[in-house]
Structure formats: C-alpha cells, structure tokens
Amino acid sequence: MAPASDESACLGAVAAQTGNTVTVLSSQTSEANNMVMVGVGPDRAPWKCLINGGAVVEVMSMTNEGTL
C-alpha cells in the first residue's frame, strides 16, 4: 500500500483534473513510483496516478475513450 500522503496527493490531482468526486480503489508501492488507482464519480471510473516522493508524476484515465 502507498503511504496515505501519496494517496491524498493523487486524490487531489485527479479531482482537480476531472472536477468530480474521487475515491481510492487501490494502491501499490514500488521503488520507482507508487501507483494509486482512483475511482471517479458515482460510477467510479478508473484513473491511474503515479507519484514519487509526494510529487504526482502522471494522472491518466484508464477508460477506453475510443469506444465513447
């Protein structure tokens, strides 16, 4: 599990990008970047957040937007 501070930073980054409610679905720790999976909105659409040392590295939707 990623540290709570990393989870919180990812929640803030995803919320800022989506303008929606967010919740942590899962998190993993690694040497390179911690990964936090975030659910967005009432359907909890999956987003991935990579964070390293408290700095958000990447925020990305995991939804296949090509089918929309």
Image: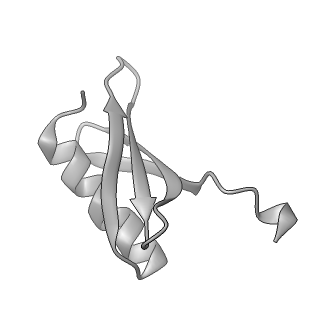
- Residue pushed farthest front? 43
- For the C terminus, the quadrant is bottom right
In the picture as drawn, the residue positioned furthest to the top comes out as 31
Task: Please indicate whether residue 66 sits to the left or right of residue 44 in the image.
Answer: right
For the point 28% across and 66% down, the residue is 12
Residue situated furthest left in the rendering = 4
Residue ID at (52%, 54%): 46
Q: Position of residue 52 (x, y in %)?
A: 32, 36
Image point (62%, 51%), residue name: 62
* Residue 41 image point, x, y percent: 43, 72
Residue 20 lies, in percent from the top left, at: 40, 79
Q: Quadrant of residue 11?
A: bottom left
11 versus 5 height, above or below: below
Look at the image and name its color scheme: one colour
Check the image and report above or below for 50 versus 46.
above
Q: Is residue 20 above or below residue 13?
A: below
The N terminus - image quarter? top left
